Amino acid sequence: MASGSIDAKLRKRAERVIPGGMYGHMAVQRGMPEGYPQFFERASGCRLWDVDGNEYIDFMCSYGPMIAGYGNPRIRAAADAQRERFDIGDGPPPVLVELAEKFTGQITHADWAVFAKNGNDATTICNMIARAHTGKRKILVGESAYHGSQPWANRRARGTPPEEHIHYPTYRFNDVEHVRATARKAGGDLAGIVVSSYKHDVPQRQELVDPAFAREVRKICDAESAVLILDDVRGGLRLSLDASWSELGVQPDLSAWGKAIANGEPLAAVLGSEPYREAASSIFYTGSFWYQGAPFAAAIETLDVLKEVNAPRRMEQLGQQFRDGLYEQAQRHGFGIHQSGPPQMPMIEFENDSKKTQVASFCANALRHGVYLHPWHNMFLSIAHTEADIEQALEGTDKAFGELP
Ligand SMILES: Cc1ncc(COP(=O)(O)O)c(C=O)c1O
């Protein structure tokens, strides 16, 4: 950002009142290339405008929550109407029940639902339910998987004593033998295994789930009387309109949802199957904002909107169009690239670029041509992207390749 820009001035102000200038995954100083704006002013459809008025076709979708377009008129109208009538009070509005009915009607394994705000809440509640149900303590988690920033899941961050993790042994994703051995080590104390929709452990290369792995993990849980917890917070509704492992014929016991389920209104959900209902009702979890009506109304509409266009397949097509275009351009410009993950949640890497300097330059170039990409995180498509948007984005990336040394 140019030093006199509005973004630069805001960053200067933020440095004085926000530790580090910005926190968390949206802090651009945490590894985003030079030139990425920190602050935005406006969003519509699949486009964003930063505070200096620059327009971008967005391939991050707020890191997932936007799935049907910023300001989707139907979803916004549903949320606004509910907000107008009743948003928060001394109890929830009826839409909470309606949404629970909708989810349990749509998600094969789900017989009940509870709602919260963030993916963090949902994954933590799943663990609590698994422990309450089994009376056991150990929860296996993927070696470098992300399930939120709360201490149990936050292994790498400072501020968390290692003791927080003694009941969370780790396993290697897609490695059945490793899961089996780790489960064995937990002895009779294995409460559950948390799995991601697929391996999207930033900044590593993405890896789809091996269907045999999914089936075996299910069997290990059954054999150990442990709970299979599917974290669909990131992949939910982009990979499938059901729980993502349903596509492989594997049903979890509990699933955690967040991000896209209300198209950006703050909402997370835990869905569970019948045997876990009692445990779910025996423990206490809550939050001041967990009963808010507008996000429930937004989620009901979001589920309808996504179903009408078979959203996962639509995003897959658009993602594939983008992916094919990038491969063709890389080849023409003489660069080796690798694209991983499902097309609707793509990630791009350059060959011989372990420090990610080349991909960072590529993304910085693309940004100047109006395309907002991420150099080391999986990206996200939405149903608000169109073939024409992808074409336009590819014009930008063509120039971005052309400007690389
Ligand atoms: C797979 C997964 N689980 C859980 C979370 C935590 O969700 P939230 O940031 O809404 O707390 C995330 C967030 O990125 C995630 O990707």
Image: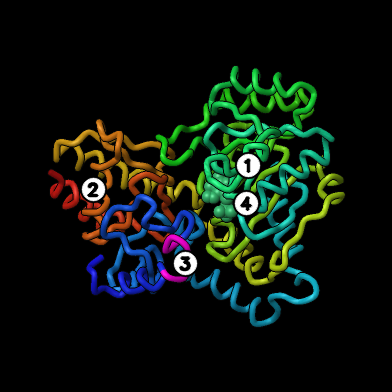
Whole-percent x and y of residue 72? Answer: 48, 69
In the image, residue 399 sits, relative to residue 351, either above or below, namely below
The tag earlier along the polypeptide, 3 or 1, is 3
User: Which residue matches tag 2?
Assistant: 362
In the rendered structure, are the residues bearing label 1 and label 4 in contact, judged by CB atoms less than 8 Å apart?
no
| Circle on res. 18 | 3
Query: Which stretch did the figure color magenta?
Result: 16-22
Q: Is 63 part of what is drawn in magenta?
A: no
Work out which quarter of the rendered image holds the N terminus and state it.
bottom left
Q: Residue at x 62, y 51 (%)?
A: 120
Q: Secondary structure at mark 1?
A: loop
Q: Give the number of the mark in front: 1 or 4.
A: 1
In the rendered structure, are the residues bearing label 2 and label 3 in contact, judged by CB atoms less than 8 Å apart?
no
- The colour mode here is rainbow
Q: Residue at x 37, y 47 (%)?
A: 319
In the image, residue 328 sits, relative to residue 42, either above or below, namely above
Q: Is 20 part of what is drawn in magenta?
A: yes
